[in-house]
Image: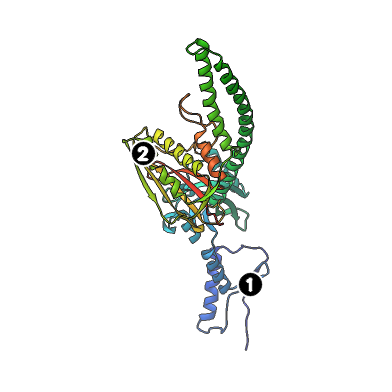
Amino acid sequence: MTMAAFSIRTSCPRVFCRSANSTILRLATQISRGKRPIRGAALFCTIAGMEITPEIRSILLESIEQTSESFFITDTEGTILYVNPAFEALTGYKAAELVGQKPSMLRSGEHPPEFYREMWEVPKSGRRWTGRVMNRRKDGALYNEEIRIFPIKGTDGAIKYFLTLRHDITKETELESQLIQSQKMESLGMLAGQIAHDFNNLLTIIIGSMELVSEDLQPGTVGAKLATEILRSSKEHAGMIKQLMSFTRKQDSIQLPLNPAAPLGELKILLEGLLGKSMKIEYDLAADIVTVKADPEQLKQAVMNIVINARDAMSGLGKLKISMRNSGPEELPPSLPRARYALIEIADSGPGIPPEILPRIFEPFFTTKPKGKGTGLGLSTVYGSIAQARGFIFASNRPEGGALFRIYLPEHRA
């Protein structure tokens, strides 16, 4: 049998453009299907030493379609020409909604114009651009991604397309921010602990001395009144120091195996009295909660502090819900060790927490209340109490409005 070889070769990668490939394919088809077809005729494009057959081309296309890494291709004007299914899944948009549009439709508004200008000008100059970007999905949710933009050049060296690879790093950035916050709280705790220790010693001397002085003063005299006021103020500040020492884990606590529903149940009457008749409180406490190891009094105080904060935020008007259930490994925040937890959720119908102060609300002495109305130790004490029980606490805003506090207490096994 006589065979003729039709070969087009190049040593440079990605030389053949779409129209050239189509012409070559059409020619090969005519050769194999003509009036006198050549049996076994096929197309082989040798590119950089590798033969790209129709079968290999099909494999490449299937790989692009099925890869979990999202990407899209634009022309030199930034118009989207192609998106792969992973990009559709990431953004929530269908390919038909994206092709022909500009990538700017994904902008979150979280970056300044200069950021986007550099993001576009760098690849236009022939260089690769890499960076982290916060974008917005079709449903409005924000997400973080790492982006790499590559200029794709033709045979003449001119840029023809831009390839943009995108990797969702939302979970990674959440872990990073939580780690930074944890380290910050640890540093603040060390500083606050030293301050609390020094002040506690000073107040002990002041209180002890004033009690001795008071014994020698006649009741009703100016001196006796001043001594009483000094004692009252000193003991009040000693209470603040006690809270601060709780935050820094310098105060003794009794950690006991318990069902956390028990101390929360004991709070019902007290909380109803604190909230008053103008506020509605709802409970949803599951009965089969896992056993945890915690100080019951500290747990009650932590919940009470959160409730008081919610009451103040709602100006005494609104609705509060306290719920408790078990939480398994599959539904935990990414920063938590995989285990079973008792999850306490406290949700209110107030205005929520301003995003700009959300990262700081557990810091000691941080408060948004007017001067003289708050010490800034309420939520930092909560943080310290939960940490002593080897638990975790998170604050967020609910989509429907209001603040949500979630307390995770790990299961205790004897």
Residue 118 at x, y percent in the picture:
57, 42
Q: Which residue is drawn at 51% across and 26% down?
A: 236
User: Total number of numbered labels?
Assistant: 2
Residue 112 at least partly seen: no
Residue located 51% across and 12% down the image:
218
Q: Is residue 373 visible?
A: yes
Q: Name the residue under label 2.
A: 272
Judged left or right of residue 310, residue 389 is right
- x and y, in percent, of residue 377 in the image: 52, 33
Q: What element carries label 2?
A: helix
Percent of width and height locating residue 109: 48, 41
Query: Depth check: 117 or 270 in front?
Result: 270
Residue 192 disc label: none
- Residue at the outermost bottom position: 1
Q: What element carries label 1?
A: strand
**Given the image, on which type of amino acid does mark 2 rest?**
Glu
93 lies left or right of 380 = left
Q: Name the residue under label 1.
A: 51
